[in-house]
Amino acid sequence: MLEKVLNSEEYKKERTTFNIISLIITSDTLEYYTDGENYLICRSNPNTPIWVWNKDGISEDIVNEILIKLDSMLDDEKVIQITSKEIIFKKLMEKYKDIVVDNYFMQKGNYLQMRVYECNNLIKPKNIIGYKERPTYNDLDLLTYFQKCDVEDTIREEYAKQVTEEQLINAAKRHIDIPNFYVWKVDNRIVATAGYIDNRVSMVFTNRIDRGNGYAGMLCYELCEELIREGKTPMLYADADYIASNRAYQKIGFEKVGTLYNVKIGKAKIKKMDR
């Protein structure tokens, strides 16, 4: 039934939007639920986020079936992140309103809205100095600092304080070990990072003192060139709330093709934290 959903015309139309599912289904510990037609719920293992795809226009009965399956995947001791379309997201917010962990971006009424971009017409930035290079473990301290800044920039202060130095170092090491992870250098100084897995551009970051100069955009452009030469169409996910990064992607030719929503749920009634 899994293959039936993945090969359906409805799913194929949204394959870019649900790019992560193509990685999840390769896991040896894959957990999934599907009726073979209307929806697919999956995760790599019980410690990873849940992704939910559903066909548009599904009935209330199918929505409720999805919610029942999701409820069975929640754990009393863990916070679970769920990524889905708006219809399932809204139902989750209604059903679990008392145990949603950190109603981030509360003023918008959602936890996190994620824009999905695809690049079919690459545009080269003009007059950007610097060059692309693979990092080494000699750069570990700086890349660990970048990880720290990225955490502070993208999650609530309360959560950022809980991230340990060891976690930051390990994240920086993982990036260095990814074959397609690169840094952008100006005068032999690292100013930005980005990489890709399959055709998905990610790990994009610009040093705080170097923002506004187009460095990350230029690095992403060169990575997209590589992907296009490999016959792949570049795509990426972007937090809708970060206007500057969205504009940077749009400037090099990325166009929005979808929208997803993230919510984190703690079944153990973890205190809800509002902005």
Image: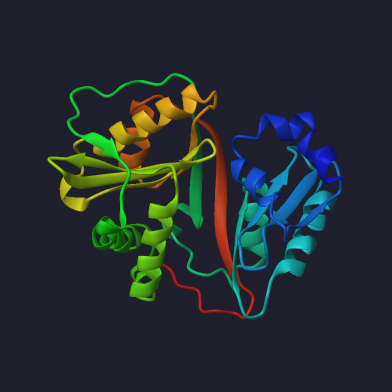
Residue 231, given in percent of the width and then of the height, sits at 54, 23
Residue 151, given in percent of the width and then of the height, sits at 35, 62
- 133 relative position to 201: left or right: left
Q: Say which residue appears at 33% left-offset and 57% top-offset.
A: 150
- 136 relative position to 34: left or right: left
Figure check: 188 above or below 33: above
Residue 50 lies in quadrant: bottom right
Q: Say which residue appears at 55% left-offset and 40% top-offset.
A: 259
Residue 9 lies in quadrant: top right
Residue 64 lies in quadrant: bottom right
User: Is 50 in front, or is 89?
Assistant: 50
Residue 78, given in percent of the width and then of the height, sits at 60, 75
- 253 relative position to 80: left or right: left
Instruction: Looking at this view, name the residue that lies furthest to the left.
Output: 187
Q: How is the image coloured?
A: rainbow
Question: What number of labels is visible?
Answer: 0
Q: Quadrant of the C terminus?
A: bottom left
Q: Say which residue appears at 68% left-offset and 29% top-offset.
A: 13
User: Is 123 in front, or is 90?
Assistant: 123
- 50 relative position to 260: left or right: right
Residue 121, given in percent of the width and then of the height, sits at 44, 19
Q: Say which residue appears at 49% left-offset and 31% top-offset.
A: 234
Q: Quadrant of the N terminus?
A: top right
Q: Is residue 214 visible?
A: no
Q: Is residue 19 visible?
A: yes
User: Is 24 in front, or is 53?
Assistant: 24
